[in-house]
Image: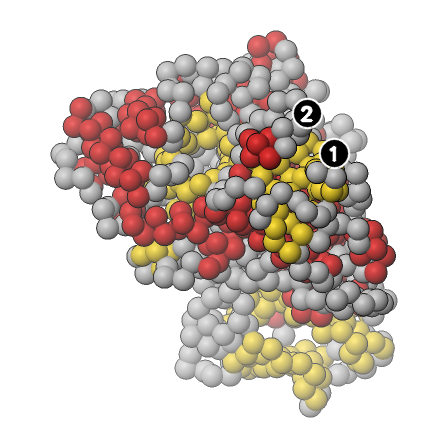
Amino acid sequence: MMGAVHAVPLHAETGDDAWLRYAPLDAVARKKYESLPASVLTLGDSPVLGAAQGELIRGVRGMMGRTLREGKSLPQENAFVLGTLAELHKADPALRAPGDLREDSFWLTTVRVHGFACLIITSPTDRGVLYGVFALLAKMARNETVASLNEVQQPFAPIRWVNQWDNLNGSIERGYGGRSIFFDAGSVRSDLTRAGDYARLLASVGINGCAINNVNADSRILKDDFLPQLARIADVFRPWGVRLAIAIDVSSPKVIGGLDTFDPLDPGVSDWWRKKVDEIYQQIPDFAGFIVKADSEGRLGPSTYGRTPADAANVIARALKPHGGLVFYRAFVYNHHLDWRNPKNDRARAAYDIFHPLDGKFDDNVVIQIKYGPIDFQVREPVSPLFGGLRSTNEAIELQITQEYLGQQRHLCFLPPMWKETLDFDLHAAGRSTPVKDLVAGKSFHRPTGGFVGVANVGLDADWLGHPLALANLYGFGRLAWNPNLSSGTIANEWTRMTFGNNPTVVRTISAMQLASWRIYENYTGPLGAGTLTNILGSHYGPGVESSERNGWGQWHRADHQGIGMDRTVATGTGYVGQYPAPVAGKYESLKSTPDELLLFFHHVPYTYVLHSGKTVIQYIYDSHYEGAQQAQGLVGQWESLKNDLDDEVYAAVLARLQYQAGHAIVWRDAVCNWFLRMSGIPDAKGRVGHYPNRIEAEGMQLQGYAPFDVIPQETGSGGKGIECAPPLQHCDASFRFDRAAGWYELDVEYFDQINGESKFRLFVGNQQVDEWVADDHLPAIKPGGDSSTRRRITGLALRPGDEIRIEGFPDGKELAPLDYVEVFARSQ
Ligand code: GCW
């Protein structure tokens, strides 16, 4: 079957299979694996073992072009042998695992059984066997050696879950990869193929639980007629060892249960939960548990009855206990009507203030699910002090795979470097070394359970998350949940090899892009711990510096004419710093020892304050934004260098995303810099902010039909203004004369692409049409501004002085062919 293979065809690299492509290996790699067995023997029989065997066959077939023979009895030839330790021991009492293996761990070893060379994949559990198969196939995909294997891998923590924020109508809250793979129009989808594919992806990195619906939960999910539908999802998860969980509304006993209360201390309520849970387990025997968001962002909760989160969690936990289920109670509980005028108020304090006093009051099958930082998934936050504030309570860290505040998968932002900083952070709880990873895994205080939860929000899009490179975040979350000691570099390298193959240039380039991307994003968005500076009242996407202030949401940065930052010190501020154990509190309490990157999270300083780096705060804001925008443009070039090494389709898809990002990074740069220039009155020492010599503002062009309008907020449009072509006009013109030397130029047209229309544009030089495009992207915007501002780049234009450059705009719907400016660069720039 195997003929010599000289050139490996480039296979489509997007699609359902993500990093599980099993693309044919090149001749050298095949040679390496040639002596692997030709048959597979699976001891025992279960859906998970079936999936494990099927995966092994699939992977070997894909990579080696060989179909393994299925054996049923003890090896009569060299074989892969799959089975639990117990089964293996029955078959060959001489086989003993090296030491104690924890649940879900696996052992890969090459031994002789009955005289035949066997590659054994075993574990205390079926699920661990499946993980072992994935690990072996991953090694092959990455061309690693598998000869004389003897390797044990143990998961760092028992809880390795993802949450999906899917609504029953099929939309996904903060989802950017298409509609729900689970729900449509109020019910579970009839075709659950993608749900099964998802479970396979999750299993391949060791994820063992998935909560499928929005934490802003619809209580219908617990209705009797919904449970059989949930059972169908559990069925497609089961072969992959992924247990189903759901988010619930604590008011369900009242809303759908017909009771007149949902008071957790009411016996009728506890009865209701017990019956409901029993009913669930009748249909889903391996049901994993509930996620609870209560007393948060308008959700009802125990505070209605003057009860505590512990009361609410425990009544549900007691119903689940006999069945082995867990309750994840989210610590994301805060008052979003905080009085912003009171300088002592601080949303960051909420989780610790509420949950720390309850430590020890939660049942053993309750897990407090804590976001990594005290605010809300910002580009830079300190570690939540609550991780160190619970010692007699289980906890899990909540990380966000979906890039809600981090570019929504339109911007490249590889998150493992950020997650690692959190996980490795030493909180020094109880006066000793307690890194967050140990705390959440339950190691520091010997808790029965704990671990990692990632909010994934994959959707029906072929690439799951909406950006082919964003899948590295799902992969990376799983890998870190399995082993938080892996480096970000290792994770990037593994993922790239499995997704794009082992070409060293490709691996080096993509890994480097991924590893740089979070800091690039931080550079052109929120500096020095001030928060992402996005529009927090709406999309959470484009720049919206002002939106944080003067409202009750508490994402304040307190920037005014003199300075910026939240004083969270004990001495003069909100006292938040005091929630950390002394060694950490000491560091953050003092300006001098607070690291620059978190300065504005902890302190209010004048714009002229000099950072450890030697720059003033204001100049740092300007410089980092210019640097970030330039780095974003650099990503485009790095990707372009791979043109001949990648599948055309994925090359083009990623290129388009990166070009868009580079343009949007300039929107960010200009909005943030101009806002701070206006606020501080301190000019950019390098003279860039507010000066755009190559820019021709649309409102300054010759207009026919087009009329100027104010962009709101003003800094999200260049010069604060744009132009629009309003009804009844169906077509407008804006033109200007080119007045520079003859030569080759590049021309950037900045326009606004809203979701409520698909305007058309045409660009002319003299009478010649040189470009046309439709503003048909699906950005989260219904008006011109920072969310919708988009760049069209036209390269290689021969221009002469006196040429007329003209843009024709054709409005559509509510999108009035809006334009912001044109920027003309000599080609060498
Ligand atoms: O970040 C905020 C999001 C909400 C989300 C909430 C939460 C599901 O903007 O969309 O609600 O966090 O985590 O509960």
Q: Position of residue 664 (x, y in %)?
A: 63, 58
In the displayed structure image, the side of residue 58 where residue 592 appears, left or right: right
The three-letter amino acid code for the residue at tag 2 is: Pro
| Within-10-Å neighbours for mark 2: few <14, some 14–19, many 20+ | few
Q: Residue 73: where, in percent of width, then height?
A: 59, 45
| Percent coordinates x, y for residue 131 in the rendering | 60, 41
Residue bearing the label numbered 2: 98
Q: Residue at x 32, y 61 (%)?
A: 185
* Amino acid type shown at disc 1: Asn
As helix, strand or loop, the secondary structure at mark 2 comes to loop
* Marks 2 & 1, CB-CB < 8 Å contact: yes
User: Of callouts 2 and 1, which one flags the residue occurring earlier in the amino acid sequence?
Assistant: 2
Residue 150's disc number: 1
Q: Position of residue 216 (x, y in %)?
A: 36, 43
Q: How is the image coloured?
A: secondary structure
Q: Which class describes the residues within 10 Å of circle 1: few (<14), some (14-19), or many (20+)?
A: some
Q: For the residue with label 2, is its CB less than 8 Å from the closest atom of ligand 1? A: no
Please state, as top left, top right, bottom left or bottom right, where the N terminus lies in the image. Answer: bottom right
Residue 747 placement: quadrant? bottom right
Residue 607 in sight here: no
What residue do we see at 60% from left, 11% from top? 582
- The C terminus appears in which quarter of the rendering? bottom right
